[in-house]
Image: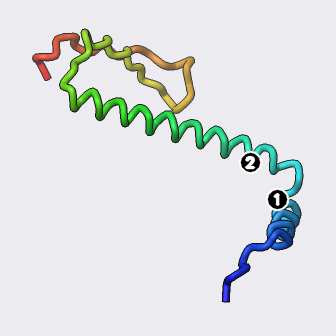
Amino acid sequence: MFRNGLEPWHLLILVVVIVLVFGSKKLPDMARSLGKSARILKSEAKAMKDDGKQADTGAQPAEEPAPAQRTIQASPGDVTSSRPVNEPTDTTQR
């Protein structure tokens, strides 16, 4: 029944329909964002794999980096009214 389900003229019709629906101006932007998403996914997968290898070998980093200082903002993205939060540096109090 579906012996020759996807022939070249089917692909041509599919491309024409996609161009008509999305427009030729948005297609490059969509392809660019799809490429960025694929790169992000690839880097995250690699980072997870590296973390798994590090946990398996039991290797600990030489020293932990200092945590970034947190700030309080009145609204998201508002940097004019943000102020630093004073937190205790001693981790035994937590």
Relative placement, left or right, of 10 versus 5 is right
Determine which quarter of the picture holds residue 57. Answer: top left
From the top left corner, tell me how far across and down residue 23 is, in percent.
87, 56
Q: Position of residue 71 (x, y in %)?
A: 41, 20
Residue positioned 22% across, 18% down in the render? 60
Q: Residue furthest bottom?
A: 1
Dot 2 and dot 1 residues touching (CB under 8 Å): yes
Label disc, if present, on residue 91 of the rendered structure: none
Q: Position of residue 47 (x, y in %)?
A: 41, 32
Q: For marks 2 and 1, give the CA distance.
A: 9 Å
Figure quadrant of residue 56: top left
Q: Amino acid at mark 2?
A: Met
Q: Where is residue 92 drawn, in percent x and y?
A: 10, 17
Q: Nearer the viewer, residue 94 or 2?
A: 2
Check the image and report above or below for 94 versus 9. Answer: above
Rendered view: 47 above or below 2: above
Query: Which residue is tagged 2?
Result: 30
Question: Residue at point 55% right, 20% down?
Answer: 79
Residue at image point 22% right, 20% down = 59
Q: How is the image coloured?
A: rainbow
